[in-house]
Structures are given as structure tokens and as C-alpha cells.
Image: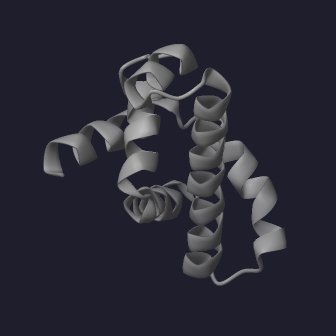
């Protein structure tokens, strides 16, 4: 029922990420890199990399929830059940979006 709205909200949330956040998520989800490999790219400890990746994921999903609540005109608290159902199926969408963003800038 909310698939298209969430897709648009998720795309908007992806566009709101910083270049580094997008790169981190692209490296993990699209390229399949682990935190050690990503850490080597940025020359930081794996714990730092893990925090960065987790923060980027949290930012992405928080922004998507806010955007969806705004698009549907409902309170953020009411959106949780809808989002849980949809986010369980996002791996493919995330890979596609990050792949698209890497080609376009």
C-alpha cells in the first residue's frame, strides 16, 4: 500500500546523505566490503569505520521515516509499523540507489 511513497521517501533520504555516508554505504552494500576493508581505505581503525557505517545507516533510515511521515501527513510515531514492514525488504533497493548515485555523482 505504501510502497511508492516509501520508495520516494527513501530516495529523498539517500540524496540527503553526505558524500562520505553514501560512499560508506555503497562500499558495504554494493561492493560487499567489510569494516576492515573500508577502514583501510580511510586509514582508520575498524571500530571507527563501524561507527561511521552504523551512523550512516541510522541517518538514512531516520530521514526516510521522517520523509515518509511528511509525505503521508501522519505523525512520526504512527509510521513505525509501516516502516518496519517495508524496511525488512530494502537490501535490493539500497544497492540500486547507491549504484545509481555512484554513476551520477
Residue 88 vertical position relative to residue 37 in the rendered view, above or below = below
Left or right, 89 with respect to 11, comes to right
Question: In front here: 87 or 42?
Answer: 42
Quarter of the image with the N terminus in it: bottom right
At horizontal 50% and vertical 24% (from top left) the residue drawn is: 39
Give the residue furthest to the right.
Answer: 77
Residue 71 vertical position relative to residue 2 in the rendered view, above or below = below
Left or right, 16 with respect to 97, comes to right
Residue 15: image x %, image y %?
37, 61
The type of colouring in the image is: one colour
Give the residue furthest to the left.
Answer: 104
Q: Quadrant of residue 73?
A: bottom right
Residue 2: image x %, image y %?
57, 59
Give the residue furthest to the bottom.
Answer: 73
Question: In front here: 76 or 25?
Answer: 25
Residue 67: image x %, image y %?
56, 72
Q: Quadrant of residue 11?
A: bottom left
At horizontal 35% and vertical 53% (from top left) the residue drawn is: 19
At horizontal 60% and vertical 25% (from top left) the residue drawn is: 45
Residue 87: image x %, image y %?
64, 43
Amino acid at each position: 500500500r505504501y510502497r511508492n511513497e516509501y520508495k520516494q521517501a527513501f530516495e529523498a533520504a539517500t540524496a540527503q546523505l553526505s558524500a562520505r555516508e553514501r560512499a560508506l554505504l555503497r562500499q558495504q552494500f554494493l561492493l560487499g566490503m567489510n569494516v576492515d576493508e573500508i577502514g583501510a581505505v580511510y586509514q582508520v581503525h575498524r571500530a571507527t569505520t563501524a561507527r561511521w557505517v552504523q551512523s550512516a545507516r541510522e541517518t538514512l533510515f531516520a530521514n526516510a521515516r521522517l520523509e515518509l511521515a511528511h509525505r503521508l501527513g501522519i505523525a512520526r510515531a504512527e509510521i513505525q509499523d509501516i516502516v518496519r514492514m517495508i524496511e525488512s525488504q530494502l537490501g535490493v533497493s539500497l544497492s540500486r540507489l547507491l549504484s545509481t548515485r555512484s554513476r551520477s555523482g
